[in-house]
Amino acid sequence: MLTKKALIELNKEFDFGKLINESSLDFAISNANSTKDWIKQLAYITRAIIIDHTFSGGNKRTAAALIMGALEEGKLKYDPFKVDNLIINIINKNITNINKIRRIIKDAIG
């Protein structure tokens, strides 16, 4: 289960863990925890962090670390450069659709 506290702690590895869009994170966590699809969970949280700028800084790095951590926990092989590229792709194309973000994350698993 994803928690706000865990995500704040993760962000502290890159910035100060200061929330500036707490309602977006709460909404994303609620939606993420309502599905058993772990990639969709990542999609909800990733979208909140990088599109809604949940934290004052380190949003891209936090989202990348979240995705890589989940893949490592699942013992799935992935290319870190693909994870970086998926973050950049979501930002540059302003992808907000959860199913599209889910597909992009899934494509990074190699």
Image (tube, rainbow, N blue to C red):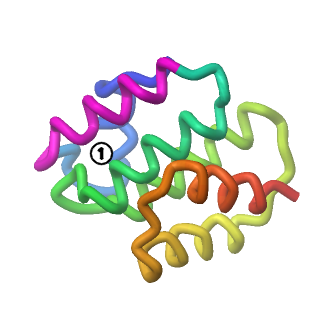
The quarter of the displayed image where residue 29 is located: top left
Tell me if residue 101 comes above or below residue 90 in the rendering. above
- Residue in view at x 29 percent, y 32 percent: 27
Name the amino acid type tagged 1.
Lys
Seen from the viewer's position, the closer of residues 39 and 1 is 39
The verdict on residue 82 being magenta is: no
* Secondary structure type for disc 1: helix
* Whole-percent x, y for residue 3 in the image: 38, 22
Q: Which residues are magenta?
A: 19-34
The quarter of the displayed image where residue 8 is located: top left
Mark 1 neighbour class, 10 Å CA radius: few under 14, some 14 to 19, many 20 or more: some
Seen from the viewer's position, the closer of residues 13 and 92 is 92
Question: Of all residues shown, which one is farthest toward the bottom?
Answer: 92
* Whole-percent x, y for residue 92 in the image: 44, 82
Tell me if residue 66 comes above or below residue 91 in the rendering. above
Quadrant of the image containing the C terminus:
bottom right
Question: Of all residues shown, which one is farthest toward the left?
Answer: 20
Q: Is residue 14 left or right of residue 33?
A: left
Tell me if residue 78 comes above or below residue 93 in the rendering. above
The quarter of the displayed image where residue 82 is located: bottom right
- Residue in view at x 33 percent, y 59 percent: 59
* Whole-percent x, y for residue 53 in the image: 24, 58
Dominant SS of magenta comes to: helix
The verdict on residue 21 being magenta is: yes
- Residue in view at x 41 percent, y 64 percent: 60
Q: Is residue 79 left or right of residue 99?
A: right
Q: Which residue is identified by label 1?
A: 12
- Residue in view at x 50 percent, y 76 percent: 88
Number of callouts: 1
* Whole-percent x, y for residue 14 in the image: 34, 56
Tell me if residue 82 comes above or below residue 54 in the rendering. below
